[in-house]
Amino acid sequence: MDMHKREIPSPLETSKKKALITLFILLGITILLFCLSFFITPTNMSIDRCFFGLFGKSDVAANRIMQRIILPRNLAAFLIGGGLSLSGLLMQTSLKNPMASPATLGVSNAAVFGANVIILCLYGTSSNSFVSASDSPFQMSMVAFLFSFLCILLVLFLSSFHKFHPTTVVLVGIVLGSCFQALTTLLQYFADDVALSAIVGWSFGNLERITMGENGILGIVLFVSLLSFSLLGYRFNALDAGDGFAKSVGVHTSLLRFISLLVASLLGALCVSFCGMIGFVGIIAPHIMKRLIGRDHRFLFPTSFLAGSSLLLICDIFTRLIGRGTSLPVGAITALIGTPLFLIILFTKKGDKYALSK
C-alpha cells in the first residue's frame, strides 16, 4: 500500500481556497485601478506632472489638481464603491432578498430627500445654501441617515403584513423610494435657480465634491464595519441558511438583522450625503461575488467591498476618458454599465442559483 496517500480536499476547503485566490486577485485589480486613476485626469496632464504633483513636487497648478481634486476623488471612488456594495450585501442577507440594495429599497432616495431638506430648509433658498450645507457634512449625513433609516423601518413594517415576502419587500421599497423622490421634487419647486442647480447635481452622483475630511469619516466607518462583519461571517452564514437554523446554533437573529440594517442604512446615507445618487453598485457587486465564490460571508464581505470599489473606479475612469476636459456625473455611467450587467445576472443560469436566489 502506498504510504503517501494523496489527500483529497473537502468541498469547504476547496471553496475557501478559491475564495482566498479571488480575494487576492481582486485586491490586485483594485490597487491597479486605483493607481491608474491618478494618471487619467480631466485636464489630460502628462504622467510626470501627475506623479510629482501627487507628492507636491510639480508646479503649483499640478500640485493643486492632484492633491485637492484627484486624490480625494480617487479615494471617494474606492470607499463609496465598497460602501455601497457592503450596504447592499447586508440588506440582501438580512432581508433574504437578492434584489435588496440602497437604491431598490428607497434608502438612497430617502437620504437624498434628507440632504435636500438640509440644503433648502436649514440654510434657506439663497444661492449660498449649497455652499453652507456642503461645509456641514455631519449635519447633512445625520439628517440623511435619519430619513434612510426611517425608510427601512417603514419597509420592514409594511412588509411584515406579507411575512417579508421578497417581492413585497422590493415593491414596498420602490413605492417608498418614489414617494421620497416626489417629496424631493416638491422641495426643488421652492428653490431658486442656483440652489436648484446644486440640488439636481445630487441626483446624478459626483465624486468631485467630496473632501479629504469626508473621506476620513467614511473610511473609519467602513473599516470598522467591514472588519466586524467579516469576523461575524459565520453568523451571517447561519442567518442565510434560515432563521430556524440560525437560532439553533445560538444566533440572535433579530439583533443581528437590526444591527445589519442599521449599519447598511448608515453606509448608504453617508455615501449619498457625500456624493449624491450612485445606483446599481450596491446590487451588482455582491451578486458577481456570489457567482464567483459562493455564499460564505467570511469572504463575501471583503470581496464584495473590493468588487464595488473596482466597479466605481472603472466607471470614474470612463467618465474622464469620454469627458474631454469636463466632469461627467459618475452616477449616470454606473447606470449605463450596471443595466446590462444586471440583465446578464438576471437571465443567466448561474444567476438563478446564486445571484437571484435567497
Image (cartoon, helix red, strand yellow):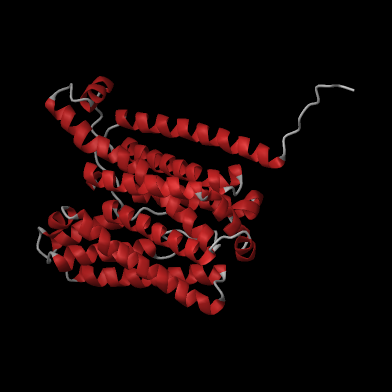
Residue at 44% across, 49% down: 228
Q: Position of residue 290 (x, y in %)?
A: 57, 48
Where does residue 298 sit, x and y in percent of width and height? 54, 45
The C terminus sits in image quarter: bottom right
In this rendered view, identify the residue nearer to me: 299 or 122: 299
Horizontal arrangement in the rendering, residue 14 relative to residue 318 (left or right) = right
Image height check: is 349 above or below 124?
above
Q: Quadrant of the N terminus?
A: top right
Residue depicted at 52% across the width and 79% down the height: 161
Quarter holding residue 70: top left
When the figure is inspected, residue 170 is found, relative to residue 59, above or below; the finding is below
Disc tally is 0
Which residue is depicted at the point 34% across and 64% down? 109
Q: Residue at x 46, y 72 (%)?
A: 156
Residue 99 in view in this figure? no
Q: Indicate whether 29 appears above or below 111.
A: above
Residue 292 visible in rendering: yes
Residue closer to the observer: 102 or 322: 102
Q: Nearer the viewer, residue 53 or 337?
A: 53
Picture quarter containing residue 250?
bottom right
**Residue placed farthest to the right in the image?**
1
Image position, residue 87 (x, y; %) = 43, 54
> As displayed, is residue 81 above or below residue 147?
above
Q: Residue at the bottom extreme?
A: 161
- Judged left or right of residue 336, residue 2 is right
Q: Residue 128, position in %: x, y?
A: 10, 58
